[in-house]
Amino acid sequence: MQISSWLKSEKHQKLVERWWIAIVLVWGVIKTIAVDKTFEKYGVNPSVYMAIVFAIAVPYAISTAKLFFSIVEKHWRNTFIYGAIAIVLHFAPDAYILSTAKSVPRSLFDGFILAIVVFSLFGIREIVIKVREHKK
């Protein structure tokens, strides 16, 4: 059985979504710990950051899962819609850091921006690869 046929089942999609929500929440806790250790002294409130991360975790996880399912099912319009939602939600916590951090050392700021860019490029690359594979 191919993974794409397995994923076409609504039951399996819900299972993937639930696991993905759990993974996103755990990753949010890890990111919050990192923000607490690196940005709190520069004015970023880790509790507010965590609230933002947790507030968007479920919609972000569902939108990225549905993005993946729409690629597998070749629903390109849905791919665009869920991709746009995922992008906005993905960058919301980073926007909070960038808008509230004050007097951040240049090396820390540059490293943060570099991490955002690198992870974004990897994510975009993977999505493009998946879309190309499924357009065939």
Image: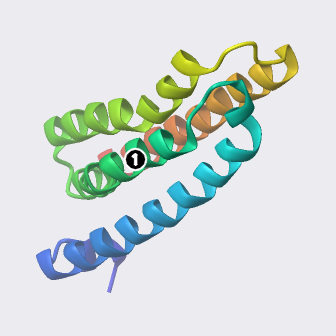
Residue 7: where, in percent of width, then height?
A: 25, 73
Residue 84: where, in percent of width, then height?
A: 28, 30
Query: Where is 3 relative to 128, above or below?
Result: below
Would you name the residue on which mark 1 appears?
A: 51
**Which three-letter amino acid code belongs to the residue tagged 1?**
Ala
| Location of residue 62 by image quarter | bottom left
Q: Residue at (56%, 27%) from the top-left corner?
A: 97
Query: Where is 128 relative to 73, above or below?
Result: above
Residue placed most toward the observer, 64 or 51: 51
Residue 121: where, in percent of width, then height?
A: 59, 32
Q: Residue at (48%, 26%) from the top-left corner?
A: 96
The reply, left or right, for residue 43 in relation to residue 132 is right
Q: Secondary structure at mark 1?
A: helix
Q: Residue at (81%, 25%) from the top-left corner?
A: 108
Q: Is residue 136 visible?
A: no
Residue 60: where, in percent of width, then height?
A: 32, 48
Q: Residue at (31%, 45%) from the top-left corner?
A: 135
